[in-house]
Image (spheres, rainbow, N blue to C red):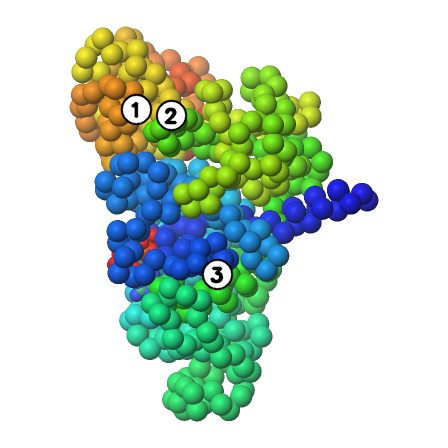
Amino acid sequence: MSQKQVNFLDEVRRRRNFAIISHPDAGKTTLTEKLLLYGGAIRLAGSVKSRRAQKHAVSDWMEIEKQRGISVTSSVLQFGYDGYCVNILDTPGHQDFSEDTYRTLMAADSAVMVIDCAKGVEAQTKKLFQVCKMRGIPIFTFVNKLDRAGKDPFELMEEIENVLGIRSYPMNWPIGTDGNFKGIYNRDKSQVELFHGGNHGQNVVKSTVGDASDEKFKGLLGTEMYEQLQEEIELLDTAGDEFDLEKIAKGELTPMFFGSAMTNFGVQPFLESFLKLTKPPTPRVSNAGEVDPESKNFTGFVFKIQANMNPAHRDRLAFIRICSGEFVKSMEVNHVRHNKKVKLSQPQQFLAQERAVVERAYPGDIIGIHDPGIFKIGDTLCEDDSKIQYEGIPVFSPEHFAKIYAKDSMKRKHFIKGITQLAEEGAIQVYKELNIGTEEIIVGVVGALQFEVLEYRLKNEYNVNILMQQLPFKHVRWIEMDGFDSDRFKGTTDTLIVNDEDDKPVILFQNEWSIQRVLDRNEGAVLKEISARSF
Ligand code: G4P
């Protein structure tokens, strides 16, 4: 094997790529920041006090995010730790932008689910967990805010199983709960680790580590806490699940960690164990079978498009997940959908707000490529002529709908351009009423705040003011039916049949009850919640 090949394999094998998911406020941003702190990518974590102001500065680009203090788009953060090259796919904090998170999960090899120990499994965690499950990726659980009062750890394990339907395996166990969090017990090493100080988690914390049977811990913890720990460990060992790496890899068992992202307690043990348990990029499914990440030819797919991230440049970036081979700056690849060669110039990688031009990148990495308007979400790129196509990225069902028009009909061209680009980015889904011109457009979004972003961006980026009329629909279903004919199809008075962007028929519903009625009235019709269509 040549040295070049050895280097390539080393690069692939040291890659770890994951996304962090959580219900808002569980501590995703804080944990991300602390992982960067431990990775040496930032020197001081934002202090607790100044966090509110800076909170989203790390991954926010758009003005609207700053105005509202929410994170709208996802970004990618890369750092090195102990020989690993870690890519964190950051996801929007606000649930109204969860669609972006769904798509980002398509580019992730594993997920870290952050749970607030006092709140347990919350609504948004449940939704995002389902997407991870659909993909069958490993899911790691970080139970956060152990420095505060919270639910009993055994109760949390039960809740995860009952609500999410996944068994858990605690990799470590908290010592001292309810505001008295002292440290963790590492089950793998049978070691106790007690944390000291903290400085509000601005710096890396120090700790005392030793064998759990060491009597000194009895002194340090007090007899009561020490004995409680021994009992809990015994209970876990006898009544808990077996550690099973294969089940973890398939997303059937979630390794569970306890800690406090704010004080840094438990962050480093989590990171180290997580990096050991996760795998380098695994083969990806394409229409020509699985593609080995270690194969020579570069392949990747577009999972996200973001326009106008930098108003000064008015650029548009396509985010590419590299699946195999080596990426080299300015290389020429096949754009499979267009059946055309394209040159991948100005490739960029991201660290916090900084973008750097990347010379080489490897499977598991995400790069941003300048997009002159040729990419769509789901596009595959490959170096050779194999013309494979990676699995499509599913279109998730919007829950809010509105009719929109340009206020000034003279601006129609800009309006259409803006709508088209935002739809290509996946920020909105566009529907057309049957037999009606294109003066008005129906837009569907997953979260209501996306309408605000739409209005704001059309005004600021395309100079178009719009009028918006909210529609009462709540659900969309894609119709699959042999010989579908809209004139003969029997809807109900409160439904509307429209076409999606690919002219596929969909029905908009006001309530779940009508969905069943339409199914009853139309024999052979199948109504799908996630589109068979993909980007
Ligand atoms: P998110 O990205 O999941 O939405 O959560 P984020 O990290 O922004 O954290 C939400 C709130 O929870 C923040 O408080 C943060 O400081 C706090 N937090 C995060 N991790 C921990 C932890 O381990 N323990 C405790 N006690 N709190 C934690 P905030 O009041 O909203 O903001 P700020 O004033 O702290 O900036």
Kind of residue indicated by mark 2: Arg
Callout 2: SS? loop
Is label 1 in contact with label 3 (beta carbons under 8 Å)?
no
Q: Is residue 79 visible?
A: yes
If you read the primary sequence from the N terminus, does the residue marked by circle 1 or circle 2 appear first? 2
Label 2, ligand 1: CB separation under 8 Å: no
Callout 1: SS? helix
Mark 2 nearby-residue class (10 Å; few <14, some 14–19, many ≥20) = few
Residue in the picture at 41% in, 86% down? 221
Q: Is residue 534 visible?
A: no
Residue 461 numbered mark, or none: 1
Residue 78 lies, with reference to residue 203, above or below; the image says above
Kind of residue indicated by mark 1: Glu
Alpha-carbon span between mark 3 and mark 2: 34 Å
Mark 3 nearby-residue class (10 Å; few <14, some 14–19, many ≥20) = many
Kind of residue indicated by mark 3: Tyr
